[in-house]
């Protein structure tokens, strides 16, 4: 840093003081990480010299500027660092902490001077004595790492001599940028005018040269706002060191990509989200050395920050090898906070559970500390990142670590956006905030109203819906064509549907601040000037959601919470219900708690016995509650019902969705299996009466033996054993080879005979037990009119004879 005393010219004392304060603050910010890195490697003479030069420069400048407190603090630090350079002292953690403390005090004093405030009345002598008094650790070169947390190790990227620079107010650069943007708009308007006139080759050539110059100037001035990501990373090493020591954790910090450049204002916007993520990684993620040893991990945790440019975006990746996010605990916290129902939690995927980390008020911390546990953080992180047109993504590996990826625009002044039309006016919205766009006549979209609120169902997924005109207090114009429905990602993590007149275009938008009065509405993020030169407002997705009072947390269906809130206000008790379509076409409701599961069943497994419908499931017969057995297709969807002990099957045409219905139907009208009618989403649906449904089931259920068995008398015959028996088993029949030893034959059993000898023997047995007998012959033709036997390869006649015997129970 150049001493202020050496600056030549006519600069006044106030200007000299401001220059000194600015340089001091910037150098302090950069040196915080250097001090931490020097602590990890005390032999690094370059870093030690840089720190020493800072205090030496401050001491030399503040004498000229009459800043005695600055001089006293910097002089004490300079003396100690001089001893370390001479080998008289050791750069132990206590000394480094004292140096950092002096740097913090100098920073506080510089900020007070810059703001014109009174200097804080602190005891500087305490900090100086902590630095100048050698501790026990300074008397020994060997430092036992087992007695204290290890300092943070920072990967060094190599020092580079900085280019020659000058200071310019940011407001001046903004004026230059605005002027160039106006030049671009004027160039575009001139281009349209030239196209409307006759072709002039010479004029076109001059205009192309002007356009190139304007574009180059815009690029160069844009670069004046760019700043290295090093400034974004500057405070990270110090923060990691201090938190690690406070929490007793050892952390190896790696920083990469510091030479990547991004907009200066974007750097300021990303500092807070990045700081919070790093604090979370240290507090929640990386475990203590004891826990890491128990988990088979190295005692030193790894924290890595990497920045890179990808197209017109800056990608910042923060990864650690800690415990990751405990999604089960997140779900417990969400249920306890009333933000999630247990039923919805059971249906959530792992990705949906992970999204809960972005809900306000949720924290996995066991107790509130100075670092975390208040549930305020990741929701603000997402809001800040998405407000500048960025995205945040999580890659969670429980027990192995967490990777958080931030994607932010390269510059805050130019972002990709969509031009939309609503209420006869044009608005812009960041392209990153829009998930999907479709028209209201799309077959995959259904719009319904529940309690005065709109619900948009897109491919079975339901969203809260608003019309932009309603939020902004504008009249909705009559449109000749269909309206556009945009699925917008809000900062709360809950997408919502927004209706607009049309989406007209997409282009790179130059963003400028809007007037304070406009910004105070909370629904705008600024203003923009597209190529047509007409100013338009940039919409803020989170602000629109807040203005429309959309829910910040739902279970897994937007409409369900709306119904629950409406029912709570009216005092109506609501229960979860399955909305389904009967095979006959009616839509009905059935209480969800009675449904064990929904599955597809082969239609061939359905049948009748004794006038009752049944289905063979898991080796047993289950009664069919609605009595249907013929469906006309190979597979049928069915509800598996259970009242605790009795099981039933309910075939349906289709399962639609899960809704909230009143426990008592809106209109009670009991008949058959129906208890009344409930109105859901404006649709009148019959409600199945579970009492009547289970009461209609056969007493004692349907036992397997009610169908009877096929008794193959001639069990030694090869054809009977190898051909007939497999055929009967494939048809779902129970086959018994030979006659039961105890002659325990049911009248519904069918005895199949294939030889004269077996027939003679079975005839005697049949007279004793009274079951039906079916004779099978080998010849295709009957022996005569009195021959009642069946050709053994006539499958239809054979199955009909068996079915007739089993259902009638008669004797042949």
Image (cartoon, rainbow, N blue to C red):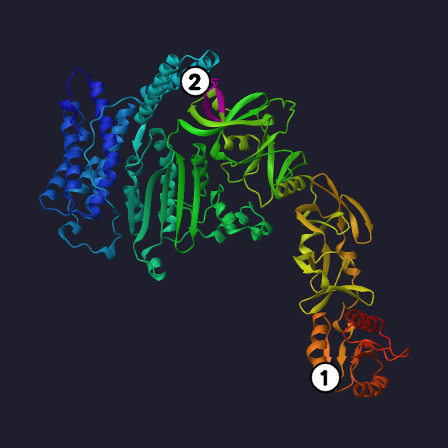
Residues 745 and 7: in front is: 745
Does the magenta-highlighted stretch encompass residue 751?
no
Magenta-colored span: 522-537
What is the C-alpha distance between the residues marked 1 and 2?
96 Å
Residues 155 and 334: in front is: 155
Residue at mark 1: 715
Q: Residue at x 14, y 53 (%)?
A: 141
Quadrant for residue 740, please give it.
bottom right
Task: Indicate which disc, 1 or 2, sits on the residue closer to the N terminus.
Answer: 2
Q: Are marks 1 and 2 in contact (CB under 8 Å)?
A: no
The reply to whether residue 376 is visible in this rendering is no
**How many numbered discs sit on the rendered protein?**
2
Does the magenta-highlighted stretch encompass residue 524?
yes
Left/right placement of residue 567 relative to residue 61 reads: right
In the image, residue 575 sits, relative to residue 640, either above or below, namely: above
The reply to whether residue 563 is visible in this rendering is yes
Quadrant for residue 509, please give it.
top left
């Amino acid at each position: 840093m150049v001493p202020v005393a050496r600056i030549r010219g006519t600069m006044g004392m106030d200007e000299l003081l401001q220059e000194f304060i600015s340089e001091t603050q910037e150098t302090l910010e950069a040196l915080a990480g250097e001090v931490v890195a020097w602590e990890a490697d005390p032999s690094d003479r370059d870093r030690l010299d840089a720190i020493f030069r800072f205090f030496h420069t401050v001491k030399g400048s503040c004498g000229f500027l009459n800043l005695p407190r600055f001089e006293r603090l910097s002089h004490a630090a300079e003396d100690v660092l001089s001893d370390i350079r001479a080998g008289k002292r050791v750069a132990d953690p206590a000394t480094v902490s004292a140096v950092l403390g002096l740097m913090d005090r100098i920073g506080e004093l510089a900020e007070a001077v810059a703001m014109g405030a009174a200097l804080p009345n602190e005891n500087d002598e305490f900090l100086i004595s902590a630095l100048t008094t050698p501790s026990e650790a300074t008397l020994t070169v060997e430092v036992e790492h087992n007695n204290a947390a290890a300092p943070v190790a920072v990967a060094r990227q190599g020092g580079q001599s900085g280019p020659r620079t000058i200071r310019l107010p940011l407001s001046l650069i903004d004026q230059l940028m605005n002027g160039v943007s106006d030049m671009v708009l004027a160039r575009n308007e001139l281009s349209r005018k030239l196209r409307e006139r006759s072709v002039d080759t010479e004029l076109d050539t001059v205009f192309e040269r002007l356009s190139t110059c304007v574009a180059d100037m815009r690029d160069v001035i844009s670069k004046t706002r760019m700043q290295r990501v090093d400034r974004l990373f500057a405070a990270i090493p110090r923060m990691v060191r201090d938190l690690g020591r406070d929490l007793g954790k050892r952390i190896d910090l790696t920083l990469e990509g510091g030479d990547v450049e991004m907009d200066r204002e974007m750097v300021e916007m990303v500092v807070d989200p990045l700081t919070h993520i790093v604090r979370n990684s240290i507090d929640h993620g990386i475990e203590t050395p004891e826990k890491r040893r128990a988990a088979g991990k190295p005692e030193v945790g790894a924290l890595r920050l990497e920045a890179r440019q990808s197209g017109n975006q800056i990608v910042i990746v923060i990864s650690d090898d800690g415990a990751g996010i405990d999604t089960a605990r997140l779900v417990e916290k969400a249920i306890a906070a009333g933000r999630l129902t247990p039923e919805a939690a059971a249906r959530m995927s792992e990705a949906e559970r992970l999204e809960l980390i972005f809900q306000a008020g949720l924290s996995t911390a066991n107790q509130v500390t100075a670092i975390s546990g208040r549930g305020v953080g990741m929701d603000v992180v997402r809001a800040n990142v998405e407000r500048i047109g960025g995205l945040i993504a999580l890659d969670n590996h429980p027990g192995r670590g967490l990777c958080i990826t931030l994607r932010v625009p390269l510059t805050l002044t130019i972002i990709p956006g969509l031009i939309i039309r609503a209420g006869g006016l044009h608005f812009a919205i960041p392209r990153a905030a829009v998930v999907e766009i479709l028209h209201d006549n799309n077959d995959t979209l259904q719009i319904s109203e529940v309690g005065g609120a709109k619900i948009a169902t897109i491919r079975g997924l339901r969203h809260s819906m608003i019309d932009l005109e309603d939020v902004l207090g504008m009249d909705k114009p009559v449109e000749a064509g269909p309206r556009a429905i945009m699925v917008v990602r809000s900062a709360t993590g809950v997408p919502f549907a927004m209706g607009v007149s049309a989406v007209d275009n997409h282009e790179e938008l130059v963003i400028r601040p809007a007037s304070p009065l406009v910004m105070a509405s909370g629904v705008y993020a600024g203003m923009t000037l597209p190529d047509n030169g007409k100013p338009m407002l940039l919409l803020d997705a989170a602000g629109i959601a807040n203005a429309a009072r959309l829910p910040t947390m739902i279970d897994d269906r937007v409409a369900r919470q709306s119904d629950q809130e409406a029912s709570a206000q009216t005092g109506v008790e609501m229960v979860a219900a399955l909305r389904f379509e009967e095979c006959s076409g009616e839509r009905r409701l059935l209480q969800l708690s009675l449904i064990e599961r929904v599955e597809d069943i082969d239609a061939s497994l359905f049948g009748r016995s004794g006038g009752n419908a049944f289905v063979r499931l898991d080796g047993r017969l289950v009664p069919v509650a609605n009595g249907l057995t013929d469906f006309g297709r190979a597979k049928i969807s069915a509800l598996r019902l259970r009242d605790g002990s009795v099981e039933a099957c309910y075939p349906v045409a289709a399962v639609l969705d899960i809704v909230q219905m009143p426990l008592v139907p809106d209109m009670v009208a009991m008949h058959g299996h129906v208890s009344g009618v409930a109105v859901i989403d404006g649709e009148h649906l019959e409600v199945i009466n579970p009492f009547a449904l289970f009461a209609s089931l056969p007493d004692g259920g349907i036992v397997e033996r009610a169908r009877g068995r096929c008794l193959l008398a001639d069990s030694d015959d090869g054809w009977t054993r190898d051909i007939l028996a497999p055929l009967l088993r494939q048809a779902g029949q129970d086959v018994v080879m030979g006659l039961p030893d105890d002659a325990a034959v049911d009248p519904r059993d069918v005895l199949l005979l294939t030889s004269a000898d077996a027939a003679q023997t079975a005839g005697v047995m049949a007279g004793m037990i009274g079951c039906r007998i079916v004779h099978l012959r080998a010849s295709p033709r009957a022996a005569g009119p009195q021959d009642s036997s069946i050709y053994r390869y006539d499958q239809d006649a054979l199955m009909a004879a068996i079915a007739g015997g089993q259902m009638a129970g008669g004797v042949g």
